[in-house]
Image (spheres, rainbow, N blue to C red):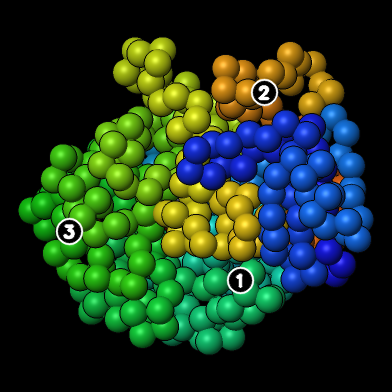
Amino acid sequence: MNAQILHADHLLTMDADNTVIAQGAVLIDQNGLIGATGTAAQLSAQHPGVPVRRLANRLLMPGLVNTHAHSGLLRGTAEGLPVWEWLQQHIDPMHRVLNAEEAEIASRLCYAEALLSGTTTIVDMWRYMDGSARAASDLGIRAVLVPYVAEHPDHNYFETLDTNEALIERWHGRAEGRIQVWVGLEHMFYATPQAWRRCAEMSRRHQVGFHTHSNESRFDVEETQRRHGMRPIQALEEFGLLDAHHVMLAHCVWPSEEEMDILAARRIGVAHNPVSNMKLASGAAPVEAMLARGIAVGLGTDGEKENNNLDMFEEMKTASLLAKLSRLDAAALDAWSVCRMATIGGARALGLDKTTGSIEAGKSADLIALRTDTPRMTPLIGGADGNLHHNLVHAVQGGDVDMTMVAGRIVVENGQLLSGDLAHAIAQVNRAVPPLFERRAEWLRLNGTIDALHA
Ligand SMILES: [Zn+2]
């Protein structure tokens, strides 16, 4: 690729000072890295031979980091239940009958939806993830692939630590470094003590992260206390799971003070999923208390079945509203904190903050352009006293994303996916879903509802 300069009306860098540059520009080198930022006048004077691409009526900002998602095919079909009943009646029976082809189709749709709404890095916990790796490789998204591992006789239909390790060996670091493969675990309850030890050991040996769901609901807390006499994050620590190379936990809705101290002391990343936590009636995570302790908190949409979309701008707004409502404080979780969680905070939670999450020299050119010539972006006032960050959190939607670039490659332009055939991906999902649902219904007829807890 050739070096180029992108010049937009506003450049939001999300550097340490949340710098916004009017008539700002980014130099992108031939390796897809950010060479420099500044005003358009400065950069074109310093780099006279480099072509300038003018993005009129556009705001450039870092691509969003979705720290917790699931590819999936159940959108709008698993509604109105709290987490554990929902797992037993809809989700686990689907996992029993899902095949590799359906899993890949789901990932193609998921990554297309993410890129179109401004996400350039996604953490995907899913199944048969060779297909997900191919989808990420083709579509151009930066992906952290985390297999849904279960190591328990009652859950012998999920991924295993063996298939997880094979995926690490095949795909970690591939696609010019865009693909990472971590060690995943659906939930502590889905594995044996021996498997817990192996999760951490495998993560250290391969120098990859470890990701699981923890402390999602009050039930999760009570059940862990009943089984182990301690709270979920204390149990993860007690059983060695926090000794992994790097740990990022989804949810953390009900952490005690002691659990938050553990998260901070061990530099554990957290994925905050406000839409999912509201929809499944899980609760309101103490985001500000975690941020105040220096914990790296990112935002995640969770899956298509618990959100029901992957729009990170909607997640930003919901994070803000949930914090304000749950504390009855209109000043709770200010807009800049939310912007940071969706970008550099998420990258920190993943240990990827040297690569992505802000527009700064040396990082990968993972960035998005938003239309500013829309009613919901108007008026747009830059500068320290402006409203730009408030518009981003409370007004913008994913459909306002005009251009998405990952590692210097434009994958969405004029709001259209360039890196894949979107119509084909949608048609494939629509074809795949009826037979999948038929097989799930057949399985439930023969076996009845699963006791996901095998308690
Ligand atoms: Zn999840």
User: Residue 382: which numbered mark, if any?
Assistant: 2
User: Residue 422: which numbered mark, if any?
Assistant: none
Q: How crowded is mark 3: few (under 14 residues within 10 Å), some or many (20 or more)?
A: some
The amino acid sitting under disc 1 is: Ile
Q: Is mark 2 on a helix, strand or loop?
A: loop
Image coordinates of residue 116 in percent, x first then y, are 76, 46
Going from N to C along the chain, the mark reached first, 2 or 1, is 1
Side (left or right) of 165 relative to 356: left
Image coordinates of residue 252 in percent, x first then y, are 32, 44
Image coordinates of residue 151 in percent, x first then y, are 35, 74
Q: Mark 3 points at which residue?
A: 235
Instruction: Please identify, in this view, whether the residue under mark 3 or under mark 1 is nearer the observer.
Output: 1
Question: If the image is split into quadrants, where does the C terminus sit?
Answer: bottom left
Residue at 42%, 35% in the rendered image: 277
Q: Residues within 10 Å of mark 2 (few under 14, many from 20)?
A: some
Q: Name the residue under label 1.
A: 179
Give the spatial CA distance, label 3 vs label 1.
30 Å
The amino acid sitting under disc 3 is: Ala
Above or below: residue 16 compared with residue 58: below
